[in-house]
Image (cartoon, grey):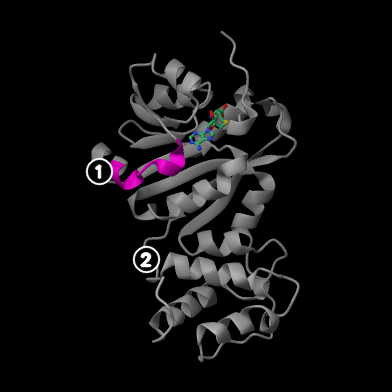
Amino acid sequence: MKHIARKRFGQNFLHDASAIAAIVDAIAPKPGDALVEIGPGLGALTRPLRERLGRMTVVEIDRDLAARLRNDPQLRVIESDVLRVDFAQLHAEMAASGGLRIVGNLPYNVSTPILFHLLAFAHCVQDQHFMLQKEVVQRIVAPADSSEFSRLSVMLQWRYAMEKVLEVGPECFDPAPKVNSAVVRMTPLAAVPHVNPARLSELVQVAFSQRRKLMRNTLGPWLDKEGFSGAFDLQRRAQEVGVDEYVALARQLDDTPGIKPL
Ligand code: SAM
């Protein structure tokens, strides 16, 4: 029976053979990889990945699609909202010495929450390949001091090395989305400074809350309220501050006696 795409689950199914082949080549799956696909849908990526891998695991929220996928005995189907999946447990179960490889043409309506959810499991991950809105990929990989540098850039660049690997037009999907798409490769950095992600997230959110204003009008009052008395140049806009500086400030805040722990 034909599946009717569900908008609430961000269902835009890939059908273009050359786009699918290019994405699978970029992922370069090898037998033995502990690969997990988020949102396999009708299996456009799952089938070629499975051919190269043998077994793999998929996480699908749509009950009807999960039921179809269970017909393939080589697939471990987790029927769930990916935001509820404990990837550390999956990692332990899959006994992946090299870390999980996570892939997916993500539902665009929840792609940012999914990226933030996965941040907590970066230590269990070898790499991630995700199709996202092209505009989101550009923000993710944007360097400091560019107009696209944003909260998302800081929160992900702190933890991953990232690159845009290819672009995909709307005509490659059914139904066609209204936006262009791109695939990003994210590789967790081996050595990261110890920082409380909740502190970094709070700080970056305030800094970018009014990106055109100098931070003395946004972050400044907030730092005062928090009781921070260290040095930080607030005569800049949020996008002019590098990732390392945000991380260093978050660490300083965590180390300042009297500032509420998160
Ligand atoms: N991988 C397929 C493809 O490329 O044709 C489908 C991609 S479609 C853009 C997104 C998929 O993610 C759909 O199958 C949808 O049901 C699933 N999905 C949406 N929200 C989800 C969630 N919170 N957790 C797990 N899967 C989800």
| Residue placed under numbered mark 2 in the picture | 191
Q: Quadrant of ligand 1?
A: top right
Residue 13 highlighted magenta (yes or no):
no
Q: What amino acid is labelled 2 in the image?
A: Ala
Of residues 149 and 255, the one nearer the viewer is: 255
Q: Is residue 185 visible?
A: no
Count of numbered labels shown in the rendering: 2
Query: Which residue occupies 25% across, 38% down?
Result: 93
Query: Which residue occupies 63% across, 69% down?
Result: 144
Q: Position of residue 95 (x, y in %)?
A: 23, 40
> Residues in magenta?
81-89
185 lies left or right of 53: right
Query: Relative to 182, is 39 above or below?
Result: above
Q: Residues within 10 Å of mark 1 (few under 14, many from 20)?
A: few
Between the C-alphas of marks 2 and 1, the distance is 22 Å
Q: Position of residue 177 (x, y in %)?
A: 71, 33
Kindly indicate the quadrant of the structure image that contains residue 193. Answer: bottom left
SS for dot 2:
loop
Q: Position of residue 111 (x, y in %)?
A: 57, 45
Query: Relative to 146, is 123 above or below?
Result: above
Q: Residues within 10 Å of mark 2 (few under 14, many from 20)?
A: few
Q: Is residue 165 visible?
A: yes
Which quadrant would the C terminus be assigned to in this image? bottom left
Q: What amino acid is labelled 1 in the image?
A: Ala
| Residue placed under numbered mark 1 in the picture | 92
SS for dot 1:
helix
Of residues 89 and 141, the one nearer the viewer is: 89
Kindly indicate the quadrant of the structure image that contains residue 191. Answer: bottom left
